[in-house]
């Protein structure tokens, strides 16, 4: 019988891409040992973009097999006690019978050496245990956030209040700089939201896994790695083996090529960058789901114009209700209606605005890019690290406020974008000042030097005797041993 590793991502493009990249990594280094099957949910969270991406991967990576579940539908109507995050957890729980059937079917032709799950898919732990299949988590945030979740059950027992109400409280986690309670990952801010309890369930089951695979590398987060290794993040149970196999980044996020699938506009953005002076362009991009109000978009435009610096700015359609939907695709924005009158004409030549998406890895690798204003999503952080580009941290959702604190205080790879009010609004003056500081000041130059050093460390992690290469080898050996 052939030996197989089964990967189970949560619904949503970002989750699927991360698992595909992990599958590619395993096949790149251990293709003679394991086949890869990825379980795909279908139903309420389907998008055409995700379907297109999976079809592309199927064509270009025939060694990866996709097993599609029967469709399941849930109501996507959120409420104060049932956020979209909670609905996603509910959706994956409803798929547990599909997981059981899939593992049964795959087991008839393969020996399943491991099931690797996303945190949303924690309920599948019990399904896999019925088959005596070792289950691992693939944790796609950094080790700092992992440490916080390992310690989360301990913090939960120390207070009865919601983190969102502890406005002046700092939480202390092993190996981390103190974190403001209100900067904790969005799903666990409110104890009244079912998602809080879903995340607590996930955190309490981390120690019950066979191991945790993390997309980071040793020299990026040394203090946190030491705290996890010492076992102090889980005071009342053994810490499972942790494998740091990063930086793992997707070289093309659409699956259609590094220039964005041949789109003339996206190809032109790379050509435009190639025509700019070295380290002269600030790149602004806020992830696949990062949206602002129309007023905030105008404020950013005014700040960029004031700064006088060259810029490449990805603009998405503004949010209408102030909420970010992590599971749906948005339409392209109307730039003429959204940006200040005459902005595009006045900044023509030194600035370029593109709609909705950019080939971020390709952009960051351009010689002309000297700074990155980012939402602090972990994939984006790693992409900037691998390119040696310093950052301005402007977090929006999920665990990004924690990432900002780590980037600014511990890693010294970013400077913070400061809010003008409690609603997170940033003034044009702050945008102007931060862009100038990043691109012109001594602090900006120090960040650039530090970023270049970390780029070299990232390369070293995947060298022949690097830490991440060793971790992947150890992981594969543990699967072979069973």
Image (cartoon, helix red, strand yellow):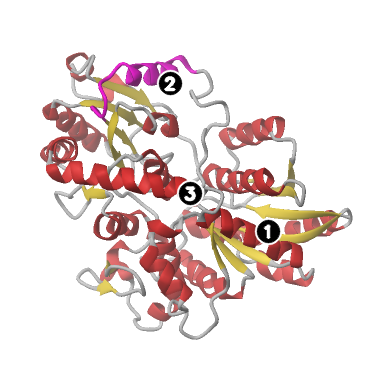
Q: Residues within 10 Å of mark 2 (few under 14, many from 20)?
A: some
- Disc 2 is placed on an element classified as helix
Q: Which residue is mark 1?
A: 476
Left or right: 351 as drawn, with respect to 72 = left
User: Residues under labels 3 and 2: Cα distance?
Assistant: 25 Å
Mark before the other along the chain sequence, 3 or 1 = 3
At a point 53% along the width and 83% down the height, the residue shown is: 237
In percent of width and height, residue 295 lies at 21, 36
How many dots with numbers? 3
In percent of width and height, residue 211 lies at 60, 68
- Disc 3 is placed on an element classified as loop
Q: Which residue is mark 3?
A: 247
Residue found farthest to the bottom:
236
Left or right: 468 as drawn, with respect to 178 = right
| Magenta span | 263-281
Question: Is residue 273 shown above or below 201?
Answer: above
Q: Which residue is mark 2?
A: 266
User: Residue 65 versus residue 221: which sits nearer the camera?
Assistant: 221
- The quarter of the picture where the C terminus appears is bottom right
- The quarter of the picture where the N terminus appears is bottom right
């Amino acid at each position: 019988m052939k030996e197989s590793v089964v990967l189970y991502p949560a619904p949503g493009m970002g989750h699927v891409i991360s698992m595909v990249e992990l599958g590619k990594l395993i096949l790149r280094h251990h293709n003679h040992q394991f086949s890869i099957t990825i379980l795909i949910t279908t139903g309420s969270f389907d998008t055409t973009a995700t379907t297109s991406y999976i079809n592309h991967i199927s064509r270009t990576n025939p060694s990866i097999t996709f097993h599609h579940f029967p469709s399941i539908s849930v109501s996507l109507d959120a409420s104060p006690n049932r956020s979209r995050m909670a609905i996603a957890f509910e959706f994956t729980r409803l798929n547990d019978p599909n997981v059981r059937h899939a593992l049964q079917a795959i087991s008839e032709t393969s020996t399943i050496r491991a099931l690797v799950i996303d945190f949303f898919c924690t309920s599948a732990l019990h399904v896999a245990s019925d088959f005596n299949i070792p289950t691992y988590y693939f944790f796609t945030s950094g080790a700092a956030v992992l440490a916080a979740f390992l310690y989360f059950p301990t913090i939960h027992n120390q207070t009865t209040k919601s983190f969102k109400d502890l406005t002046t409280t700092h939480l202390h986690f092993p190996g981390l700089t103190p974190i403001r309670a209100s900067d904790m990952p969005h799903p666990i801010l409110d104890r009244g939201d079912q998602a809080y309890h879903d995340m607590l369930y996930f955190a309490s089951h981390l120690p019950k896994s066979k191991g945790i695979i993390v997309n980071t590398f040793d020299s990026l987060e040394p203090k946190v790695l030491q705290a996890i290794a010492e076992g102090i993040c889980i005071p009342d149970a053994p810490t499972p083996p942790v494998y740091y196999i990063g930086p793992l980044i997707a070289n093309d996020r659409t699956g259609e090529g590094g220039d964005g699938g041949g789109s003339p506009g996206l190809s032109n953005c790379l050509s435009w960058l190639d025509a700019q002076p070295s380290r002269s362009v600030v790149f602004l991009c806020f992830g696949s789901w990062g949206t602002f109000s129309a007023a905030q978009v105008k404020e950013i435009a005014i700040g960029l114009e004031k700064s006088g610096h060259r810029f490449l700015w990805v603009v998405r359609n503004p949010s209408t209700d102030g909420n970010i939907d992590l599971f749906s695709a948005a339409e392209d924005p109307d730039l003429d209606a959204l940006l200040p009158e005459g902005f595009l004409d006045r900044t023509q030549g030194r600035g370029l605005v593109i709609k909705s998406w950019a080939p971020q890895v390709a952009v960051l690798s351009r010689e002309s890019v000297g700074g990155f204003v980012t939402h602090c999503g972990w994939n984006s952080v790693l992409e900037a690290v691998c390119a040696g580009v310093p950052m301005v941290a402007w977090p929006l959702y999920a665990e990004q406020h924690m990432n900002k604190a780590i980037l600014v205080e511990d890693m010294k790879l970013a400077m913070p974008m400061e809010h003008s009010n409690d609603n997170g609004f940033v003034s044009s003056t702050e945008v102007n000042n931060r862009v100038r500081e990043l691109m012109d000041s001594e602090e900006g130059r120090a960040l650039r030097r530090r970023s270049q050093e970390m780029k070299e460390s990232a390369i070293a992690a995947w060298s022949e005797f690097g830490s991440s290469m060793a971790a992947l080898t150890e992981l594969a050996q543990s699967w072979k041993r069973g």
